[in-house]
Image (cartoon, helix red, strand yellow):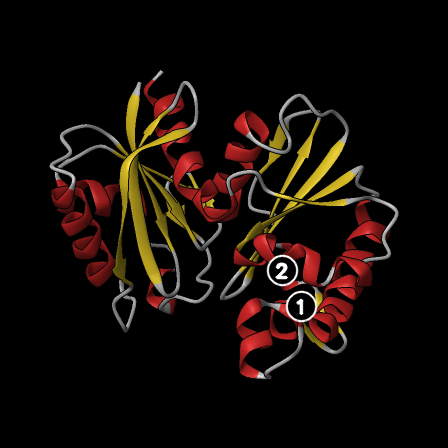
Amino acid sequence: MQMLGVDIGGSGIKGCLVDTETGELIGERHRIATPQPATPAAIAHTLKALVEHFDWKGPVGCGFPATIHNGVAKSAANIDKSWIETDAEHLFADVTGKPCYVLNDADAAGLAEMNFGAGKDRKGVIILITVGTGIGTAVFVNGQLLPNTELGHLMLEGMVAEHYCSDAVRKREDLSWSRWGKRFNKYLARLEFLFSPDIFILGGGSASKLEKFVDRIETRAPLIPAASLNQAGIIGAALYAAEQQG
């Protein structure tokens, strides 16, 4: 089955057609800059432009940077606060004219990795961490998702964790990969203390740079890169839409 998967982020809205049987992208990924301010109407119309780019007529899966409950955004991480309590699924469907299914963006990435990537056929407690503008997390226990964990908002060193060790912080503070890796190790240590995971999976752009800081990681649970790297959110969103279609 083909499905359009979309990853809505703080800086870009990315989409591609996905083969939901194999997890492979079909054709070229397309990216549109996230409008600023990232209000519900602005993002919905950008999503419409993305759907029209692919001339897509079917359902759309969307990974979104917020906790999502029955299609409604209950938080707003790195987007406009007016998203809180917005029914994202109905808004997107109204503007695009297509059925839209929305889930937390890190949860989408996690679904991709558990079905097609580094988490496939693995049991136990697995925590996927996406590192970008912020930090997103997806927690799985024996393959079952615990949705909307948002562990990037844990307090660490007197501040919200994603304000301490996200990729945006690394760039803003001009941290070397080694110095940033020491910070990220503190974050992983906190997660390990709280959840005792069997494995950490690293997603986002930092996953391709793992060799630059892996020597700073001292957790018991191994840290491995996501197989689909930056594409996981798109793949997982498409998979989620296919599942909702039955």
In this rendering, the answer to whether 51 lies above or below 181 is above
Which badge, 1 or 2, is on the more N-terminal residue?
Answer: 2
The residue most toward the front is: 211
- Residue 135 place in picture, x, y as percent: 58, 60
User: Marks 1 and 2: CB-CB under 8 Å?
Assistant: yes
Write down the quadrant of residue 239 in the picture: top left
In this rendering, the answer to whether 126 lies above or below 104 is above
Describe residue 108's horizontal placement relative to residue 150 as left or right: left
Q: Residue at x 20, y 40 (%)?
A: 93
Q: Say which of 122 and 153 sits in front.
A: 122
Q: In which quarter of the image is the C terminus?
A: top left
Examine the rendering and report whether any part of residue 87 can be seen.
no
- Residue 6 place in picture, x, y as percent: 32, 44
Q: What residue does disc 2 label?
A: 152
Secondary structure, mark 1, is loop
- Amino acid beneath label 1: Ala
Q: Say which of 184 and 215 sits in front.
A: 215
Q: Residue 161 carries which label?
A: 1
The residues tagged by marks 1 and 2 sit, at their Cα atoms, a distance apart of 5 Å
